[in-house]
């Protein structure tokens, strides 16, 4: 991935391509952990609002050219499954982001490109070093079932979920270590395919319907010099017809069509019109910063906390609202929702002990005027 804008799209893929050894970019399922040291524990992966375990949302494989210490580099994003936690509110929020990186020569992977592996073995998830992962979420599992001592969990919440999903019937049986039920906790799993964004020239801006703007769509000098009142009458019904004067409330209502909110959301729609199915926009250190869905709740520099190393954080990628269409989170009541999720990472790409370093996520929601 480079300094230009790159787009991510979801595609179905065979399971072996989404395993850690293939260095995948993916949505849902269990996380494909990169390094095996310093995994975030249950506390680091808990929701900042309800305290419950977050679910793995997605990860991007994003190595940095010219950085031997980031020959392999993965960014992971987790989110709470409770819709109420996604309501607009001050931090801490329901989202957690982490970064991990490795040298080309490391203790986990061979330096050569990976080959298609053998079929996935049956059994609960484990790291190559033997460390157990939670049967429900695939995260570090410091707890295990006291009865069978074969089932591992990140905490009591997921132990209870697994017990209700069927572990109570097979606890202690020979198959209890190999059969993992569907707990309804994980998001659907897809591969993320990355492609460069095709940009239009400045004189051929794309409209929301996908067509290029025509030269005669823009106002002429004569139009801009028209009397404002005449403009209002033309908008209301055309010149030559007699209408009652518009009162202040009506004029204000007409002006709302040109608010900042309209312009920001229109810019968002124009930018994604050529590729409306994009779920990721990636551009670390380039000119292509995030595109916003609203003029409200756009962060200032002071809103983005520095990395623990002291360096500033910079924009790296954003998650688009189109991803929600693939997560099966729609509900007749309240659903997980966002306008965009923007991830900022350490500008120096520090490597603090080789573990997983927490980064920063900014959540922007749609407003009533932008939907």
Image: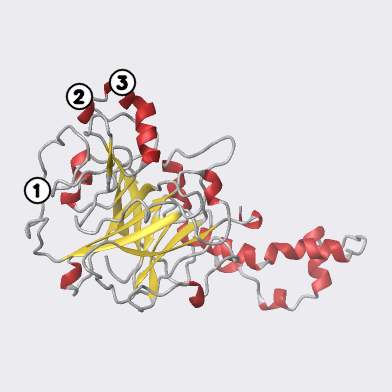
Q: Can residue 72 be seen in this view?
A: no
- Which residue is found at the position 51% from the left and 45% from the top? 336
Callout 2: SS: helix
Front position in the image: 230 or 102 = 102
Q: Which of marks 2 and 3 is nearer the N terminus?
A: 3
- Name the residue at 30% across, 77% down: 348
Residue 146 falls left or right of residue 276: left
Q: How far apart are marks 2 and 3 (CA)?
A: 11 Å
Q: In which quarter of the image is residue 266?
A: bottom right
Q: Name the residue under label 1.
A: 115
Within 10 angstroms of label 2, few (less than 14), some, or many (20 or more) residues? few
Q: In this view of the protein, can residue 354 be seen by the observer?
A: yes
Residue at image position (27%, 34%) is 146
- Give the colour scheme shown: secondary structure
Q: Is mark 3 on a helix, strand or loop?
A: helix
Circle on res. 169 = 3
- Residue ID for mark 2: 175
Q: Is mark 1 on a helix, strand or loop?
A: loop
Horizontal and vertical percent position of residue 87: 57, 51
Q: Which residue lies furthest to the front in this view?
A: 146
Instruction: Tell me if mark 3 has few (under 14), some (14-19) or many (20+) residues whose alpha carbon lies within 10 angstroms of its own.
Output: few
Instruction: Tell me which residue sits at (41%, 54%) in the image.
Output: 275
Task: Nearest to the eye among marks 1 and 3: give it.
Answer: 3
Report x, y in % for residue 369.
Answer: 66, 57
Q: How far apart are marks 1 and 3 (CA)?
A: 39 Å
């Amino acid at each position: 991935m480079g300094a230009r804008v790159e787009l991510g799209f979801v595609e179905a893929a065979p399971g072996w391509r989404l395993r850690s050894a293939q260095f995948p970019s993916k949505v849902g399922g269990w996380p494909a952990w990169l390094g095996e040291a310093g995994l975030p524990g249950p506390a680091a992966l808990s929701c900042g609002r309800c305290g419950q375990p977050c679910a793995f949302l997605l990860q991007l494989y994003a190595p940095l050219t010219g950085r031997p210490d980031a020959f392999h580099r993965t960014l992971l994003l987790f989110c709470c499954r409770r819709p109420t936690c996604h309501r607009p509110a001050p931090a801490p929020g329901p989202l957690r982001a982490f970064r991990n990186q490795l040298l080309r020569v490391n203790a986990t992977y061979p330096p050569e490109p990976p080959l298609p592996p053998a079929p996935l073995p049956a059994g609960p998830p484990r790291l190559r070093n033997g460390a157990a992962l939670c049967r429900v979420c695939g995260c570090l599992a410091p707890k295990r079932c006291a009865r069978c001592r074969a089932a591992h969990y990140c905490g009591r919440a997921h132990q209870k979920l697994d017990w209700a999903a069927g572990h109570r019937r097979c606890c202690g049986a020979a198959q209890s270590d190999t059969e993992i039920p569907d707990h309804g906790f994980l998001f659907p799993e897809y591969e993320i395919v990355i492609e460069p964004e095709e940009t239009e020239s400045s004189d051929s801006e794309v409209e929301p319907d996908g067509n290029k703007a025509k030269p005669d769509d823009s106002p002429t000098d004569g139009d801009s010099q028209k009397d404002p009142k005449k403009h209002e009458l033309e908008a209301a019904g055309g010149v030559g017809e007699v209408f009652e004067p518009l009162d202040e409330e009506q004029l204000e209502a007409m002006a709302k069509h040109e608010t900042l909110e309209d312009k920001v959301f229109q810019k968002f729609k124009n930018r994604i019109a050529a590729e409306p199915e994009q779920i990721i926009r990636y551009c670390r250190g380039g000119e292509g910063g995030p595109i916003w869905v609203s003029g409200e709740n756009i962060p200032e520099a002071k809103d983005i906390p520095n990395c623990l190393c002291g360096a500033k954080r910079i924009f790296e990628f954003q998650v688009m609202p189109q991803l929600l269409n693939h997560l099966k989170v729609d509900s007749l009541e309240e659903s997980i929702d966002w306008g965009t999720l923007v991830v900022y990472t350490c500008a120096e790409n520090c490597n603090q002990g080789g573990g997983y370093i927490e980064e920063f996520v900014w959540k922007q929601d749609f407003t009533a005027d932008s939907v």
